[in-house]
Image (cartoon, grey):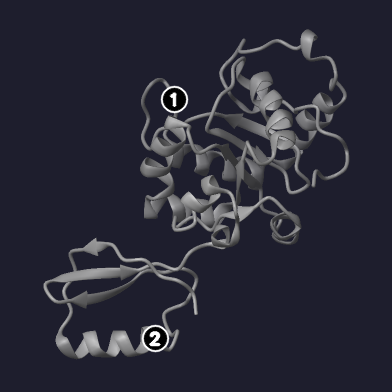
Amino acid sequence: MPFYRFGIVTHRLTPRKERLYVALAFFGKFADNRREKILRHRRFSYRWIMPNRLSGETSPYLLQHANNPVDWYPWGEEALQRAEDEDKPILLSIGYSACHWCHVMERESFENEAIAALMNEHFVSIKVDREERPDLDAVYMEAVQMLTGSGGWPMTVFLTPDGRPFYGGTYFPPVDRFNMPGFPRLLESVAHQYRDNKSEIERVTSQLTEQMGRTGQMPKGDSPLTVETWHLSPIHNRRLR
């Protein structure tokens, strides 16, 4: 039986529905893809939330995201295989427990039901603790630095199913501001490009794979982030594990 947590919401249920929901909840009938189900208790209503795949991790940072509505995966074969089987791009988010902007982006975007729905529909989302996987952090940080001329956390990187980065950045707000695109608009744009413009993605990634190891010769931050400026990090030809 999954562990559930409570949070106050505004819905009201009749006593009859309350009894029904309690009975069904304890028999596991509401454990369907981490959807919220409402249970009224006394004067308040509560929501039952099924944790995502991060609930079995040991990293405190990953556990902080275990109750997000995002269908997070830890880095591993299961997530990479799903991306390959479904031909979906990977949304890789890297951060750490003491990172202020990591918590801001979680609150603004990863706890937002509408944004989480976009992530779940179009991407295989992977959450990584940089303190637990400094090797992944180093590789993809260089990719973001090549894309933008700077880096930081939270790190947000979009990958092909075989782990090659083709777009990235750091913090993205939930709406357009700070001269940055809103995260929902970015998600839709990247999903559209991956679906309808794969040949261009492949052309750019192939060209930039050839330039791996020449970081000093690559321009940084010379132009806006568009499909023409997608860059690859120095990632090897095999899948990172």
Residue 97: x %, y % from top left: 50, 38
Q: Determine which residue is flagged by label 1.
A: 180
Q: What's the residue at 78%, 36% (across, down)?
A: 202
Residue 70: x %, y % from top left: 49, 55
> Considering the numbered disc 2 on the image, is that residue within a helix, a strand or a loop?
helix
Q: What's the residue at 54%, 61% (across, down)?
A: 55
Q: Quadrant of residue 216?
A: top right
Amino acid type of the residue that numbered disc 2 sits on in the rendered structure: Phe
Q: What's the residue at 83%, 45% (across, down)?
A: 239
Amino acid type of the residue that numbered disc 1 sits on in the rendered structure: Met
Image mark for residue 26: 2
Q: In this view of the protein, which residue sits in the foreground, 37 or 211? A: 37
With 74 as the anchor, is 214 left or right in this view?
Answer: right
Is the residue 78 above or below the residue 139 in the image? below
Q: In this view of the protein, which residue sits in the foreground, 229 or 149? A: 149
> Considering the numbered disc 1 on the image, is that residue within a helix, a strand or a loop?
loop
Nearer to us of marks 2 and 1 is 2
Q: In this view of the protein, which residue sits in the foreground, 16 or 119? A: 16
Q: Quadrant of residue 129?
A: top right
Is the residue 146 above or below the residue 137 in the image? above
With 90 as the anchor, is 155 left or right in this view?
Answer: left
With 146 as the anchor, is 15 left or right in this view?
Answer: left
Residue 108: x %, y % from top left: 36, 41
Residue 93: x %, y % from top left: 58, 41
